[in-house]
Amino acid sequence: MKNISKIANQLTGQKMFQIMDKARIIEDSGREVIHLEIGDPDFASPPVVIEACKDALDSGITHYVSSYGLEELRLAGAQSTFRSRGYMPDIRQIVVTAGANVQIYYVVVCTVNPGDEVIITDPAFVTYQEIIKLVGGIPVKVPLREENNFRLDPLDLEKAITKNTRLIITNSPHNPTGAVIQKDTYKEIYNICEKYDVYLLSDEVYGRMVYEKPGMQFFSPSTFDQCKERVIVVHSLSKSFSMTGWRIGAVTAPINLASKIALLLETTSSCVSPFIQKAAISGLLETKDYVDQMMVHYRNRRDLLVKGLNQVEGLSCQLPDGAFYAFANIKKTGLTSIEFSNVLLEKYGIATCPGVYFGDAGEGYVRFCFAQSEEKIKIACDRMLNFTVT
């Protein structure tokens, strides 16, 4: 029998999905599991989004459309960018995709050659490293430190750059730590990208999910060049709009790069389902109140979970500024992050994600997702009060 490819053999996927599968096997045995392992909101998708999809299906909008995406959706995306980031991109810069993961893949394929280096943070969203390796690139990791609130230090970033650096990937609000990069830091990062002539991919999937306080708000580095030269913005409706299963988003990039991304999409999947695009238009234009209300709940859940984690012996946790993840320090337990997560799942019925899955610097931490109800978070916190290593 023929061997499968080297590329296929090196894939590890997104292990939080594998934890979810393990948790569901436990549930099938009759035990209750609190799911804090995966970033999937428990809120229903906005009703107007569902109705828009139904209307599109009833109207027969089920055929091929442009690989760039519906012009109406791209215009809505441009208008949304103007409201949130202060500039109006040309719709030729916008390509509609099936979620954010594939946007990252398209961008890396279209900017990185085998042997090129791509700088990512450590810890970082697991997909970055997987995709970089998939195309023959070399991931270069810049550590994030708890004492710096897990925020990227531009000095560390510049030290990692070599003549082979092609792309830098940032993520704010950050998965898995919830850290938010502010304007002055992003200005330094952008200046570094200009100095060394590299692309900057800004993953803004959680851009609407910032718990604003004095001196803390969302900022996009795309403001510096309006995605005309080197900044590329990844965006999805999955998290902020509670639309994970819809698989819909859009990437904004310089026109020449966007055209290549559209060709790659055309080659791999032809186009994004038009009835889902119609739903996304309603999501962008008609759901502000719905999204704002979800953020009120997320803030309450964040505060409840972090308070509970800090009451557990051996654990400590900073209050995240964005996203819906708490990155708890578990080093005093003496367990590895995998061991700790296994104990929580198997003994206490709480599914979490080991920090080491996000990179070597994530060892000693565990990610808790607070996209579940306050009631379930309270149950999880009460169970953890009884936590023991043995």
Image (cartoon, grey):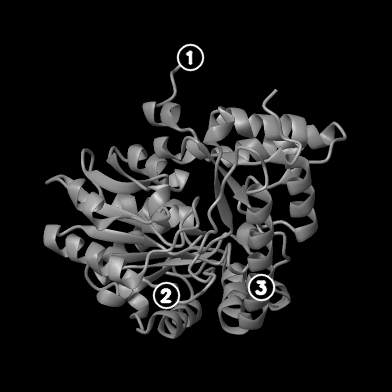
- Where residue 92 appears, as percent x and y from the top left, is 34, 75
> Circle 1 is placed at which residue position?
1
Residue 212 vs residue 297: left or right?
left
Q: Where is residue 263 in the image (x, y as percent from the top left)?
A: 35, 60
In this picture, is 16 found above or below 9?
Answer: below
SS at mark 3 in the image: helix
Which circle's residue, 1 or 3, is located before the other in the chain? 1
**Amino acid type at image mark 2:** Gly
Q: What residue type is labelled 1?
A: Met
Residue drawn at 72 percent across, 36 percent down: 23
Sequence order check, earlier mark of 2 and 1:
1
Report whether residue 260 is seen.
yes
Which sits earlier in the primary sequence, circle 2 or circle 3? 2
- The residue that mark 3 highlights is 296
How many residues crowd mark 3 within 10 Å: few (<14), some (14–19), many (20+)? Answer: few
Compared with 351, 217 (above or below) is below
Above or below: residue 285 compared with residue 152: below
Q: Do the residues bearing badges 2 and 3 touch, measured as CB atoms within 8 Å?
A: no
SS assignment at label 1: loop
Q: Do the residues labelled 1 and 3 touch (CB within 8 Å)?
A: no
Q: Which of marks 2 and 3 is in front?
A: 2
On screen, 303 above or below 31? below
| Viewer can see residue 267 | no
Q: Report if the CB atoms under discs 2 and 1 are less than 8 Å apart.
A: no
Amino acid tagged 3:
Val
Relative depth, front residue between 70 and 178 = 178
